[in-house]
Structure formats: structure tokens, C-alpha cells
């Protein structure tokens, strides 16, 4: 997997075709901007590349967490056993299935 530094370097040296970029405007305090600028310089990135890299990593983490279900060993085993040996449908489920077919 490539890091943001690899992607930025590839774009700078024309190694990849870049797609049309959208703009995001941010408002920050002077102190926030100074800290962000310092961190970007220390990371060897432009302010934009730094902000995009950090925000994108956090966004991916949040999306991944919301789209994943982590089960305990007990719950995983129970889920798997129900998949392998599903219970017989009860009266209500049979009724619903018949109504759905109509």
C-alpha cells in the first residue's frame, strides 16, 4: 500500500494522471493554522497534502468502523452454528413468507 508521500511524489513528478480536484474550504484560528503548518513542514508535506492525508485516514477509519461488525468468539460461534443448522421457521415466519409470495 502506498503512503501519501508516495502519491504526492508521483503526482509532482508526473508519474500519474491526476483527476479533477474539488475544493474544501476550512476556517481555523491563527493558532490552529500555525500548528497545522508546523506539523505539515515537519512531515515534509504541503499544508494541503498534510490535511488531506490526515483527514482521509481518519475518515476511512470512521467509515470502516461503522461498516464492520466485530463479534466475540462466542457470538461468532453462535452465528456460524445458526448458519450451518438454521432453526425451523416458526408460525409467524411461515405466515409472513406466504403473505409475501402473494
Image: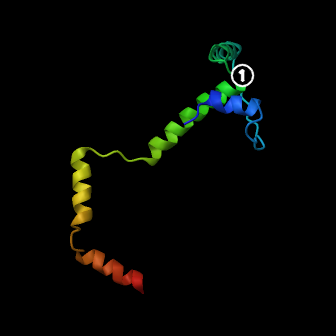
Q: Nearer the viewer, residue 80 or 5?
A: 5
Q: Give x and y (percent) for residue 13.
A: 76, 30
Q: Is residue 68 above or below residue 4?
A: below
Residue at 51 percent of width and 43 percent of height: 63
User: Residue 29: horizontal and vertical position, in percent?
Assistant: 69, 17
Q: Residue at x 73, y 35 (%)?
A: 24
Label 1 CA crowd tier, 10 Å (few <14, some 14–19, many 20+) = some
Q: Is residue 27 visible?
A: no
Quadrant location, the C terminus: bottom left
Dividing the picture into quarters, in which one does residue 36 lie?
Answer: top right
Judged from this view, the residue extending furthest toward the bottom is 102
1 to the left or right of 83: right
Quarter of the image holding residue 58? Answer: top right
The x, y position of residue 101, in whole percent, is: 40, 84
Taking 76 as reference, is 7 above or below it? above
Taking 91 as reference, is 62 left or right? right
Instruction: Kindly identify which residue carries mark 1.
Output: 46
- The residue under the point 64% across, 27% down is 5
Which of 18 and 59 lies nearest the eye of the viewer?
18
The reply to whether residue 53 is in sight is yes
Secondary structure at badge 1 equals loop
Amino acid at each position: 500500500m502506498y503512503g501519501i508521500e508516495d502519491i504526492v511524489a508521483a503526482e509532482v513528478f508526473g508519474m500519474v494522471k491526476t483527476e479533477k480536484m474539488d475544493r474544501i474550504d476550512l476556517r481555523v484560528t491563527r493558532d490552529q493554522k500555525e500548528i497545522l503548518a508546523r506539523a505539515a513542514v515537519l512531515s515534509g508535506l504541503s499544508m494541503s497534502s498534510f490535511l488531506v492525508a490526515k483527514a482521509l485516514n481518519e475518515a476511512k477509519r470512521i467509515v470502516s468502523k461503522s461498516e464492520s461488525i466485530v463479534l466475540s468468539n462466542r457470538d461468532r460461534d453462535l452465528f456460524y452454528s445458526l448458519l450451518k443448522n438454521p432453526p425451523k421457521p416458526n408460525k409467524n415466519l411461515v405466515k409472513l413468507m406466504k403473505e409475501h409470495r402473494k
